[in-house]
Amino acid sequence: MADTLQRTARLQKIVGADQVLTSPEDLLSYSFDGTAAMQQLPGVVVMVSSTEHVRDVLRLANELGCPVVTRGSGTGLSGGSLPVPNCIVLCTARMNRILEVDAANLTLMAEPGVTTQAIAEAAASVGLFYPPDPGSMKISTIGGNVAENSGGLRGLKYGVTRNYVMGLEVVLPDGEVLWTGNKCVKDVAGYSLRDLFIGSEGTLGVMTKVLLRLIPKPAAKRTLVATFDAMDRAAQTVSDIIAARIIPCTLEFLDRTTIHCVEDFAKVGLPLNCEALLLMETDGHPVVVAEEAAQMEAIARAQGCMEIRVAQTEAEAQQLSTARRSAFSALARLAPTTILEDATVPRSELARMIRFVAEVAKKYRLRVGTFGHMGDGNLHPTFLTDERNLDEMHRVEEAFKEIFEEAIRLGGTITGEHGVGLAKKSFLPRFAGDAQMRVLRELRKALDPSGLLNPGKMFDPAKGPA
Amino acid sequence: MSPPGRQSPLKGLDYSVVQQCMHCGLCLPTCPTYDATKLERNSPRGRIALMRAVADDRLTPSKAFAEEMYFCLGCLACMTACPAGVNYAELFENARAEAEQSGVLDSPRRTLLRTLVLKWLFGDLRRLRFVGALLRFYQRWGLQAFVRRSGVLRLMPPRLQELEAMTPVVQPRVSSQLIAPLTPAQGTRRFRVAVLTGCAQDLMFSDVNRDTVEVLARNGCEVFTPARQVCCGSLHAHNGELDQARDQARRQIDLLPPDQFDAIITNAAGCGSHLKHYSALLSDDPRYAQLAKAWDGKVKDIHEWLAMIGIEPPQGRLNPESRVTYHEACHLCHGQKITTQPRQVLRAVPGVTLVELPESTWCCGSAGIYNLIQPEMAGQLLDRKVGHILSTEVDTVATGNPGCLLQVRQGMSQRGKAVRVVHPVTLLAEAYRRERA
C-alpha cells in the first residue's frame, strides 16, 4: 500500500497530479482493450504528453521494478495492451500532434497518439496518400499501428504499416531515447533497428515519434461489389484476378452471416440473397483503373456472379468500405461474445482454408461469420459465442487450435495483422520453431533485461537460469 | 432516499443489454466528452464498462460513478457509430437511475431542487406556466433590464450571474392562447393528428407550436391540440426518475389515446426520442404495455411526418431570401435517425438556400439541462458549434429542438452575431403565410 502511494506520488511529480489515474472507476475503464473475454485491472494509469514524460516514467518503473504496458486507443485484438497485474498503463492518447508534413520528401512526422484517420486526412490535405487502413482506423493510433504492424483493406497492393515507417523515436526500457531511420529512401547503415521495433507489440520500447512515408494520391479509383451463390466462386474469382496479373488495392470478402449483420447496421443496400460478397477496388491512373475494373467485372461474370454493382460516386465507394470495416463489430449483433482471429494463408490456399473453417465450425457445433482480405489470404473467422457458456468457449478454443494448425500446414501464419499478444501466445512456439524462439528471447532480453515492458505478452522468457 | 430492498436498475436490465458492448472502441471518436479529455472513463465504452461492473457487483455505485453518468451528454452519437447495436440509451437511463437510487449525490440542496423541478414543476404543467408567467413579468416590465443595469447581479455568486444571463425569453402567450383545440384541415381532410405542445416548448416556443399546427392544417391534417397537456417524462427518464417517467407516460397515453389519431406529432427532438420508447418503459405494466406499443407507432417527429405525407409546395416565397444551415439535434439524428427529412422540409421552402454545416451531428452542448449542470463542457461544445456556423456565412440556422434553439441563440447573441435561429417548420410556415399576402 505504502509502495503504491509512493509510486503514485512520484508519477504525479513527473506528469502532474491530474494525469495519474488511480480511482476504481478509472482503473476499470482501462482493464480491457478491443479483445474479447480478457480483463485485468492495472495498478495505475498515466497520461503522458511528451518524450520526457515517457522517459521519466520508464526510469521510475526501472527503479521500482514495476511493469509497464503501453496503450493508445485500446483497439487491439490480441490483448497486446491488456494490463498486467499492478502495472503502470502508459497511455499515449494525448500525444496526438502531427509535427510535420514534408511535401518535398513525402514524409509525415507524428506523435504516437495521432489516429490513423487523422494521418490519412493530413496526407490527403496536401494531395498525398497514407495507404494502411486498419478496420479501426477512425480511432486506432499510429503508435499502436506501428507496434502491431497493422494491416488493413489495402494490404494486397500497398502493403502494411511496416512499408510506410521511415523512422522512429523510441524510449528504451531503461529510459534512454533512441532515433532510428531518417527521411532517406536508401539507408543501410547498421542493422535496421526501426524494423525491429515495428511489430514489437510494446515489448522492446515505447515509440514517441513516428516518421511515415507518404505516396502520391492515386488519380482515380473504382469500387465494385459482386455477389455469388457459393463461396468457392468468389474465391475462384480472386484467384483468376491475380492470375490475370491484376493487383487491385482491395479484394475483400464477406460470408452470408457477415453480410446480414453489416447490412443491418450500415444499410448500404448489400444484397442479402447471396452466399458470398466480394468488395473490389482498383486505383491508379484513370485509364488503367477503367481497364482493370472492366477486366475484374468480366472475370466475376465468367465465374457466374449473381450481380455486380459499380459504385457511382466517391461517397458510395466510401460507404461500402466503411460498411466492410464495421464487419467485426457488426457480428456482435448476433452474440454477446465475438472471438475473431486472423489466420493467414498463401493466396493459392485460400479457398481450401475457407472450406476448412466451415468444416471445423460444424465439427464443434459453433456459429461462425467469416470475412477478410481475400486478396492477401488474410481471413477473419469470427466465432459467435457467449463468454459465460464455458463449454462453448472451450469448443471455440479447440476449433481455433485446428484452424491455426491447418494455417501452418498450408504454409500460412497464426496472425496476419493482429499480433500475438496474449491471444496467440501459446501458438507462437509451434509456429516459430526453436531457433526463432531462442533469437526472439535473446533479443528481448538484450533490450529489456528486467522484463518491464509488456511482460507475459508474445512469449515468456526462457525457463531456468539465464 | 430510495426505499431499502429496491431492485437495482442496472441489475434489473436484461443481461444481454449490458453484455452487448464488445469494446471495439468505434464509438470513441464520436463521443464529445472523450474527444475533449481522451480519458477512457469519459467514453461510451468506458461508461458501459462501469455500468457492467455495477451489474456484476464488481463496483458499488460511487460518487465518481454517478458524476460520470452526469458528465455524459446523453447525445447518443455512440449509438449511431456502434456496429454492434448497443442500446446505450437504455443503459444510460438506468445508470442515472442507479446513481439516484444509491443516493451518492444526495445533498439537501440537490434533493430540494430535484423535487421542486422534477416533481412539482414538471409534474403539473399549470405550475410551469405559472412560473413562466412570473418570468415573463420580470422580463416584460423592465425588471430584468433594471436588475441587469443596477449591478445587483454582481453581488450574486458568479454561477447565478451566468444562469441569469441564460434565462430564455418567455413568449407573451402560451400555446393554448395561440392554437384552437381543434384546427380543421385546409382543403380535403387527409389525416387526423394530435400535436404535443411540450413543456419548455410551450413557454419559450409557443410560436413554433402554432407554426407546426398551421403547417399540418395546410397539408390536409385536422389537428387536435388539447389546451392542457402533460410533460412527456423525458426530463425524468434522463435524470434518473424512471418511475415518474412511467407515470407521465401513462398520463400522456390517457390524454391522447393512440387509436384515435393517424399520428401524434412532436416538434421537439428530445421529447420525440423519448416518446417513441414508451413500450420499453411500460413493458411490465399489464394495463399499458399494449397501448404503449400502439402509441410508439403513432408518434412522429414533425419533419418525419411531413416527409411521409408529402409537403404541399408553398406558393409563397421567403422575403428576403435566406441562406440557411441545418444543425442536427442529437435526439433527431442519433435518437431517431431522422436526418434527411428536416433537410427536405428546408428545401421545400422557396427562397431558402441550404448550406451544409460542418460537423452538423456534433452536440451543441444543450443536451436537456446539461448546459445548466455542466456549464464548462457545454460552453466548449457551443464554441465549436458557433465556429462552424460562422464558417458557413449564413443568416439563419435551423434546428428542430427547443434546447438547441436556446443554446445556439445564446451562442450567437454572446458573440453579437445577428444570425437568426429558428425551427425548420417556422420557415415553412412563413412561406405558406406569404401565399395569402
Image (spheres, grey):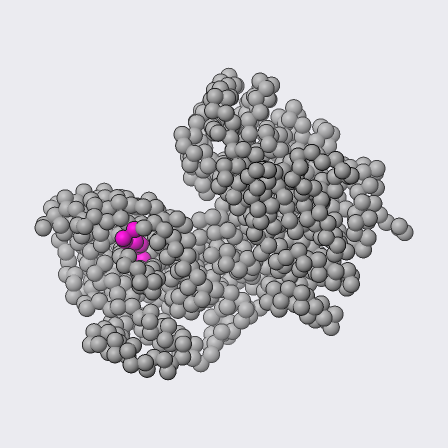
Q: Is residue B71 above or below residue B329?
A: below
- Is residue B357 located in the magenta-colored stretch of the structure? no
The spot of residue B212 in percent (x, y) is 21, 55
Relative to the observer, which residue lies in front, A309 or A214?
A: A214
Q: Is residue A436 above or below residue B75?
A: above
- The answer to whether residue A437 of the structure is visible from this angle is yes
Q: How many marks?
A: 0
Relative to the observer, which residue lies in front, B262 or B385?
A: B385
The spot of residue A156 in percent (x, y) is 60, 30
Q: Is residue A402 above or below residue B185?
A: above
Q: Main secondary structure of the magenta part?
A: loop
Residue A371 image-quadrant placement: top right
Residue furthest front as drawn: A104
Residue B397 left/right relative to A40: left
Residue furthest right as drawn: A465
User: Which span is picked out in magenta?
Assistant: B394-401
Residue A185 image-quadrant placement: top right
- The answer to whether residue A397 of the structure is visible from this angle is no
Relative to the observer, which residue lies in front, A17 or B8?
A: A17
Determine the residue positioned at 59% across, 67% down: A18
Determine the residue positioned at 76% across, 38% down: A189
Q: Is residue A28 above or below residue A107?
A: below
Determine the residue positioned at 60% across, 45% down: A109
Residue B74 image-quadrant placement: bottom left
Determine the residue positioned at 74% across, 42% down: A193
The spot of residue A264 in percent (x, y) is 45, 41
The spot of residue B119 in percent (x, y) is 35, 73
Relative to the observer, which residue lies in front, A285 or B41?
A: A285
